[in-house]
Amino acid sequence: MQFKIDTSEKFHAITIKEPVLSANMTEELDACLMPLLKQEVKNVVLNLQDTQNIDNAAGEHLVTIQQSFYEHNASFVICCMQKQVEKALDNAGILELLNIAPTESEAWDILHMEEIERELGDSI
């Protein structure tokens, strides 16, 4: 699986460079994403702009990955999803379970808001 990682002060922006995200790629996805939970910067924006299709198993795996991030007090936001991918996830009943933003900029905003929420929650 081809992907590009850009790291900033608060998050990693990961762009999947594959036209199809399928079940047989989930191990590679785990190998790419899960080690980030052990780093100081744990938040992830997953950019799917180059992905034209996704199968149900891969979609379900994204839900599992997202849950793992939130269990570790980290954010996981998917952005730039193509209409066909959105439709496939919606048909599978998965879309509403995912944290999705239309653009990478809006995904960053979500990450920052969730970071503030965590900081406020810790201070109470």
Image (cartoon, grey):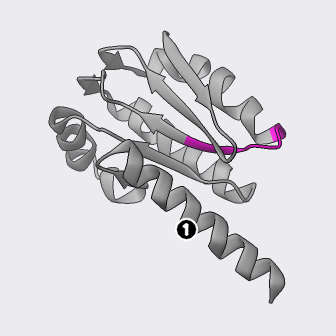
Task: Tell me residue 63's x, y (percent).
Answer: 49, 47
Quadrant location, the C terminus: bottom right
Is residue 76 visible to us here?
yes
Report the residue at 34% width, 50% height from top.
Answer: 94
Whether residue 98 appears in this view of the structure is: no
Indicate the position of residue 60 as horizontal and vertical percent values.
44, 41
- The outermost residue toward the top is 2
Question: For this rendering, which residue is in front, 46 or 84?
Answer: 46
48 vs 5, nearest the viewer: 5
Q: Which residue is mark 1?
A: 113
Looking at the rendering, the stretch of residues picked out in magenta corresponds to: 38-44
Disc 1, SS: helix
Query: Seen in the image, is 83 located left or right of residue 114?
Result: left
Q: Residue at x 31, y 52 (%)?
A: 95
Q: Is residue 116 magenta?
A: no
Is 55 situated above or below 61?
A: above
Location of residue 91 with respect to 50 vertically, above or below: below
The local crowd at label 1, few if under 14, some if 14 to 19, many if 20 or more residues have their Cα within 10 Å, is: few
Q: Residue furthest front?
A: 9
Q: Is residue 98 above or below residue 18?
A: below
Q: Position of residue 104 (x, y in %)?
A: 39, 43
Q: Residue at x 44, y 21 (%)?
A: 16
Residue 50 image offset from top left, x and y in percent: 30, 21
Front position in the image: 118 or 87: 118
| Residue 7 falls left or right of residue 35 | left
User: Three-letter amino acid code at disc 1?
Assistant: Met
